[in-house]
C-alpha cells in the first residue's frame, strides 16, 4: 500500500494543471473507438482546448458537442469517418435600435455523475489503452484470436491455459466470470466446451466494445464472483457489410438503417469447420463443425423511447477420437438466446430499462474408451435446460452531486440431465486410483428460481471525490429444497489527485449460488454449496502529456466458505471426464487470492504503440489444513503487446510469459512388472509439482487496400510463433512387452503449437 501512496504522490505533482482537456486528446479518444477522423493542425492546434465534454449516444453527437463551441464541425466522408472543417459563419442580424446587453456565454456541459468511472479494475483492452476496447482493437490484436470474449485475456492478472477462451481472473475459477451481451447473461458461452473451449460464439464483427471488470464490478452485475465481461452490440449508422474467409472458417455480417434512421438491423453468421485451429492441435483429433448467428435490431419510437431485439444461436456438431487415449466421442448440441430490451427516458434525470430474455440449450453425447490394460467403457448423456429472465433497472440523477440506481431480476430455470455409463478399470490403476468399476448413472430433473433486488447511490463528496455504494440481495430456491439467500455489498471511492492522476479504492462482499449443476439424490435436490468472497482493491493511475498511462493495482480476495468439487489431476480436458482415471474429489475449507499488477500503455493513435504489464499473484486453497496452490496459480506473469502501422501495412504482436502451473505427479512403485497386483500407484500431494514456465508469441501481419466502396484486407496470424511445445497435460498408458512384462508410460501433451491462419476480409 505504501508503494501505491508513493506513486500517487509522485505522479500527482507531474500533471500540467490544465483546466480543460486538449481537443486533440478528446478526438484521439473517439478515434480509439474505430472512427476515422481527418483534420488539419491549423484548425486543431496543439494547444486548443475543449469547452465541453464529449456527450451523446452517437459519434456525430459527441463530435458536435466538442466542436460546436469552437466554431468547428465534423462533415461525414463517403467512405466512412469524418473530416473536421470550420463551421459556416452565421449571417449577422440587423443591429437593433437600442444596443441590448450581450447574452451571457453558456456554461460548458458537465459530465454526468453516473458516467464517471468510479470502480477500479475496469478495462476493455490493454492494447487500446483506454477504458473501452473498441472493435478495431479486438480485430487487430493477435491475443484475442478474433474472439470478443478473449478481450478479457489481454488484461493484467488473468491466467489462461494455452489456446482456450476460458479465463481465470485474479485466481478465480473459470466458471466464476459473468458474461453479458446486450445485457443478456450468457451461460458458459463457448464452442467446444469439452475440448479446451476453443472459441466463444461472439464474433467481433457483431461487437461495438467490450468492458471488463477484474475487481469489484457495479452492483447490477451479480451471481458470479470472479469477474465481468459486458459486451455491447455493434451500432449501425449506415449500410455496412463485413465478409471474411480464413482457415478458421467463413463469416458474413450485414447491417442497415431503415425508417428514416429510426431503426437499425444487422445479422452476423460464422461457419467454422475442420480447417479451424483445432485441426492444427492434432490432425487426428476429429472434425468439429461450429456455427453461430447473431441478429440484432433497434427501433426508436421517439426521442425518449427505444426498443432493441436480438437473438443468438449456437450450433455444434463434433466427432472426436484420441488415438493416444483410445477415446471416441460424438456431440450434438445447440443453444438459442432471444431477448427484448426497452429503454425509456421519463426526463433528463430519470430513465428505465426493461429486459426480457430466454435461453434454450440441449446436448447429446455418446462416447467410448478402449485403452488396453487400463480401462474399457461407454457413456451416453443427454442434457437440456431452459432459462427465462426478467430484469428492470431504473436510474435517477435528481441533482448534480448525486445519483441513484435500483433494479430487480427474476430467473426461472428448468434442468434435465440423463446419463448412463460405466468403465472397467484394470490393475494397477484399480483399486489404487479408481474402483474396478466406474459408474456414471444419473437422472436429474430440477426446477429453480432466483430473485435479486439491488440498489446503489453515487455521491460527489467534494470536488474530485466520488463514492459509490451498492447493496444486493439474491435468493435461490430449488423445488423441494430449502431456499437460501445472500447479501452483497460493494463500495468504491474515487479521488482525483489532479487532472491526470486518479486513486481508486474498493471493498466488497459477493456471493455465487450455482443453479445449473445441482446434486440430485433420490429425486431430492441438494444445491451446491454457496461461494462467498471478501475483496479489497486499490489502484492508482496517471496519464502523461503524450497520452501514455501507468497503472498500479493491488488486490486481496478471501473465500471464507467451504467448497467441494471434482478436479482432474492429469488432464483437465479429457474427452470423457466422467470415466477418467484422474478424477479426484476435493474440499477446500477456505481460499485466498492476492497480488499486485503494474501496467504501462502508450497512445494507440501513434504509428508504434503498445503496452506492457507485470502481475505478481497467488491463488491457494486450504485443503486438509495445507495451503495448496490452484492449478492455474502463476506467481509471475508478463504480457507485452505492440502495434505498428504505416500506410497499408500493420504488424501486431503479443508476448506472454508466466510461471509454470502446478500439477500432481503419479507415483508408481515400479515402472515395469509381470504381475499388476505387485505394483502400487498413488498420487503425490495435490499440485505439489510445477510444469516448466510458459512462453508464447503471437503475431499478426495485415495489409489493406481500398477497393471500390470498401476496404480489402489480407492477414496472416501466427499463433505460438516460438513453437515451444509447452506441456499442459499428463497421460499414462500400459504397454505389454514381448516377454510378458508390462511397462507404465507417461506422456505430456503440449498446448497449441505453431499455428498459421491465413485470411482475407472485405468490409465497408
Image (spheres, helix red, strand yellow):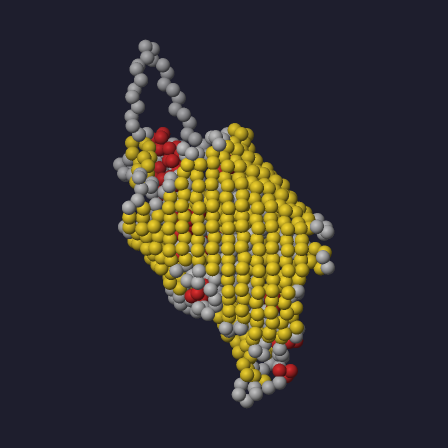
For image coordinates 48% across by 66% down, the residue present is 286
Quarter of image, res 667: bottom right
Out of 691 and 31, give the one closest to the viewer: 31
Question: What is the quadrant of residue 247 in the picture?
Answer: bottom left
The percent position of residue 497, horizontal first and vertical second, equals: 46, 41
Q: Is residue 471 left or right of residue 33?
A: right
Where does the image place residue 144, in percent across and percent down from the top left? Answer: 43, 55
Expressed as whole percent of the image width and height from the top left, the position of residue 753 reads 42, 66
Q: Quadrant of the C terminus?
A: top left
Task: Report whether residue 246 is seen.
Answer: yes
The answer to whether 706 appears left or right of 333 in the picture is left
Q: Residue at x 26, y 36 (%)?
A: 42
Note whether residue 597 is visible.
no
Q: How many marks?
A: 0
Q: Residue at x 54, y 57 (%)?
A: 333
Q: Nearer the viewer, residue 581 or 46?
A: 581
Say above or below: 502 vs 127: above
Identify which residue, 759 or 90, lies in the foreground: 759
In the rendered image, the residue lying farthest to the top is 97
As displayed, is residue 530 above or below residue 724?
Answer: above
Q: Taking 366 as reference, is 552 above or below it?
A: above
**In the image shown, does 707 or 681 lie closer to the viewer?**
707
On the image, the x and y values in percent for residue 632 come to 53, 62
Residue 240 vertical placement versus 742 (above, below): above
Residue drawn at the location 47% of the way across and 30% of the way down = 303
Amino acid at each position: 500500500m505504501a508503494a501505491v501512496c508513493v506513486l500517487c504522490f509522485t505522479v500527482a505533482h507531474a500533471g500540467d494543471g490544465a483546466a480543460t482537456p486538449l481537443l486533440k486528446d478528446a478526438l484521439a479518444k473517439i478515434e480509439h473507438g474505430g472512427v476515422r477522423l481527418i483534420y488539419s493542425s491549423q484548425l486543431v492546434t496543439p494547444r486548443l482546448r475543449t469547452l465541453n465534454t464529449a456527450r451523446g449516444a452517437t459519434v456525430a453527437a459527441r463530435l458536435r458537442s466538442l466542436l460546436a463551441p469552437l466554431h468547428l464541425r465534423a462533415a461525414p466522408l463517403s467512405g466512412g469517418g469524418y473530416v473536421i472543417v470550420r463551421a459556416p459563419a452565421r449571417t449577422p442580424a440587423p443591429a437593433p435600435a437600442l444596443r441590448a446587453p450581450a447574452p451571457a456565454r453558456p456554461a460548458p456541459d458537465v459530465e454526468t455523475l453516473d458516467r464517471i468511472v468510479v470502480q477500479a479494475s475496469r478495462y476493455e483492452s490493454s492494447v487500446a489503452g483506454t477504458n473501452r476496447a473498441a472493435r478495431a482493437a479486438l480485430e487487430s490484436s493477435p491475443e484475442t484470436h478474433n474472439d470478443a470474449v478473449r478481450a478479457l485475456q489481454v488484461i493484467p492478472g488473468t491466467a489462461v491455459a494455452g489456446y482456450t477462451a476460458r479465463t481465470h481472473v485474479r485466481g478465480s475459477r473459470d466458471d466464476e466470470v459473468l458474461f453479458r451481451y446486450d445485457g443478456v447473461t450468457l451461460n458458459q458461452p463457448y464452442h467446444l466446451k469439452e475440448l479446451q473451449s476453443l472459441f466463444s460464439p461472439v464474433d467481433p464483427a457483431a461487437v461495438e466494445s467490450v468492458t471488463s471488470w477484474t475487481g469489484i464490478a457495479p452492483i447490477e452485475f451479480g451471481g458470479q464472483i470472479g469477474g465481468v465481461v459486458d459486451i455491447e452490440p455493434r451500432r449501425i449508422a449506415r449500410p455496412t457489410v463485413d465478409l471474411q474467409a480464413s482457415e478458421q472458417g467463413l463469416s458474413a455480417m450485414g447491417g442497415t438503417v431503415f425508417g428514416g434512421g429510426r431503426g437499425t438491423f444487422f445479422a452476423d453468421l460464422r461457419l467454422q469447420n475442420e480447417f479451424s485451429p483445432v485441426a492444427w492441435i492434432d490432425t487426428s483429433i476429429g472434425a468439429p463443425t461450429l456455427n453461430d448467428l447473431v441478429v440484432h435490431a433497434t427501433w426508436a419510437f421517439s426521442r425518449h423511447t427505444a426498443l432493441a431485439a436480438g437473438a443468438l444461436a449456437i450450433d455444434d456438431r463434433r466427432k472426436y477420437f484420441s488415438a493416444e487415449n483410445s477415446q471416441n466421442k460424438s456431440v450434438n448440441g445447440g443453444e438459442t438466446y432471444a431477448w427484448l430490451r426497452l429503454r425509456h427516458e421519463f426526463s433528463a434525470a430519470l430513465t428505465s430499462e426493461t429486459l426480457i430474455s430466454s435461453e434454450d440449450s440441449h446436448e447429446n453425447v455418446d462416447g467410448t474408451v478402449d485403452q488396453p490394460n487400463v480401462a474399457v467403457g461407454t457413456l451416453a448423456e443427454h442434457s437440456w435446460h431452459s432459462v427465462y429472465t426478467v430484469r428492470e433497472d431504473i436510474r435517477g440523477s435528481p441533482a448534480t452531486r448525486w445519483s441513484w440506481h435500483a433494479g430487480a431480476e427474476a430467473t426461472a430455470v428448468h434442468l434435465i440431465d440423463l446419463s448412463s455409463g460405466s468403465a472397467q478399470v484394470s490393475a494397477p490403476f484399480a483399486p489404487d486410483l479408481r474402483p474396478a468399476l466406474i459408474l456414471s448413472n444419473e437422472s436429474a430433473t430440477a426446477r429453480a428460481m432466483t430473485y435479486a433486488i439491488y440498489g446503489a447511490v453515487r455521491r460527489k463528496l467534494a470536488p474530485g471525490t466520488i463514492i459509490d455504494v451498492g447493496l444486493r440481495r439474491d435468493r435461490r430456491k430449488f423445488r423441494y429444497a430449502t431456499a437460501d439467500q445472500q447479501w452483497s455489498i460493494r463500495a468504491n471511492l474515487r479521488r482525483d489527485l489532479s487532472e491526470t492522476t486518479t486513486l481508486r479504492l474498493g471493498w466488497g462482499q459477493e456471493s455465487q449460488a450455482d443453479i445449473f449443476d445441482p446434486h440430485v439424490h433420490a429425486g431430492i435436490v441438494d444445491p451446491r454449496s454457496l461461494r462467498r468472497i471478501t475483496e479489497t482493491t486499490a489502484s492508482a493511475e496517471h496519464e502523461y502529456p503524450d497520452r501514455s498511462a501507468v497503472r498500479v493495482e493491488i488486490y486481496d480476495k478471501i473465500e471464507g466458505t467451504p467448497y467441494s468439487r471434482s478436479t482432474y489431476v492429469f488432464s483437465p480436458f479429457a474427452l470423457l471426464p466422467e470415466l477418467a482415471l484422474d478424477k479426484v474429489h476435493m474440499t477446500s475449507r477456505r481460499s485466498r487470492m492476492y497480488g499486485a499488477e503494474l501496467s504501462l500503455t502508450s497512445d494507440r493513435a501513434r504509428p508504434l504503440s503498445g503496452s506492457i504489464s507485470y502481475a505478481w499473484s497467488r491463488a491457494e486453497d486450504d485443503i486438509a489444513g495445507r495451503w495448496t496452490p490452484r492449478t492455474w496459480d502463476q506467481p509471475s506473469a508478463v504480457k507485452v503487446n505492440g502495434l505498428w502501422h504505416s500506410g497499408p501495412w500493420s504488424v501486431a504482436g503479443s508476448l506472454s510469459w508466466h510461471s509454470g502451473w502446478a500439477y500432481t505427479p503419479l507415483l508408481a512403485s515400479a515402472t515395469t512388472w509381470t504381475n499388476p497386483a505387485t505394483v502400487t500407484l498413488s498420487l503425490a500431494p495435490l499440485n505439489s509439482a510445477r510444469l516448466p514456465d510458459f512462453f508464447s508469441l503471437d503475431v499478426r501481419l495485415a495489409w489493406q487496400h481500398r477497393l471500390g466502396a470498401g476496404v480489402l484486407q489480407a492477414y496472416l496470424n501466427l499463433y505460438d510463433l516460438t513453437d515451444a511445445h509447452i506441456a499442459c497435460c499428463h497421460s499414462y498408458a500400459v504397454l505389454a512387452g514381448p516377454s510378458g512384462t508390462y511397462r507404465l508410460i507417461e506422456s505430456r501433451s503440449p498446448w497449441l503449437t505453431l499455428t498459421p491462419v491465413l485470411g482475407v476480409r472485405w468490409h465497408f
